[in-house]
Amino acid sequence: MDAPKFKNTAYDNAVADTMTFRDASGAPIHYNSGALPGTNALFSPRFGFNYDVGGRHTTQIRGGTGIFTGRPAYVWISNQVGNTGVLTGFIQADTTFNYPFNPNPDAYKPATVTGAPASSFQLALTDPNFKFPQLWRTNIAIDQQLPWGLTGTAEYLT
């Protein structure tokens, strides 16, 4: 069993939290921009076998089947932390006259930082019931002892 758990490190965007979105069925839904997915257990049952043909340790048939959770794509979660509209904001400028190139990264930073959401922002949200993808894998193989202490293997994996 796998149970990814996230420490709540995102910042809430009070403006975004009042917005209404639509779920897959078109029903209205609200999200908390700072709430990361809850701990959702991922059940991963597996079965494997290893059979020594003839009992001489020269030929083995082995295999198994089960559900596997791959390495989680944590970037999906980190995108939510960085894209709540609180840590970053945007300026839309139709011309560059008001914002000419300046190598100083602080040149166009606001004079005061209040902690309020930016006036324009992008959101990355995660459903509270989000679960990382899982897949069903099955394999069967034969291992054969060869001369000079080598072992040959043929394996089929789906």
Image (tube, rainbow, N blue to C red):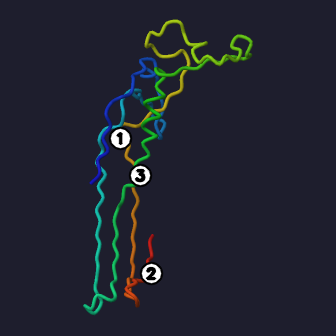
The residue labelled by disc 2 is 154
Q: Residue at x 56, y 13 (%)?
A: 109
Q: 4 above or below 43?
A: above
Q: Earlier in the sequence, mark 3 or mark 2?
A: 3
Relative to residue 99, is residue 79 drawn left or right? Answer: left
Picture quadrant where residue 54 is located: bottom left
Q: Amino acid at mark 3?
A: Pro
Q: Amino acid at mark 1?
A: Asn
Q: Nearer the viewer, residue 101 or 14?
A: 101
Q: Farthest residue in the top direction?
A: 111
Picture quadrant where residue 28 is located: top left
Secondary element under disc 1, as helix, strand or loop, is: loop
Question: Residue 115 in the image: x percent, y percent?
Answer: 43, 13
Q: 140 above or below 3?
A: below
Q: 11 above or below 45?
A: above
Q: Residues within 10 Å of mark 3 (few under 14, many from 20)?
A: few
Q: Nearer the viewer, residue 23 or 66?
A: 66
Q: CA distance from mark 1 to mark 3?
A: 13 Å
Q: CA distance from mark 3 to mark 2?
A: 29 Å
> Residue 133 bears which disc, if any?
3
The residue labelled by disc 1 is 129
Q: Residues within 10 Å of mark 1 (few under 14, many from 20)?
A: few
Q: Nearer the viewer, residue 19 or 50?
A: 50
Q: Residue at x 74, y 16 (%)?
A: 95
Q: Earlier in the sequence, mark 2 or mark 1?
A: 1
Q: 66 above or below 35?
A: below
Question: Residue 2 in the image: x percent, y percent?
Answer: 29, 51
Quadrant into which the C terminus falls? bottom left
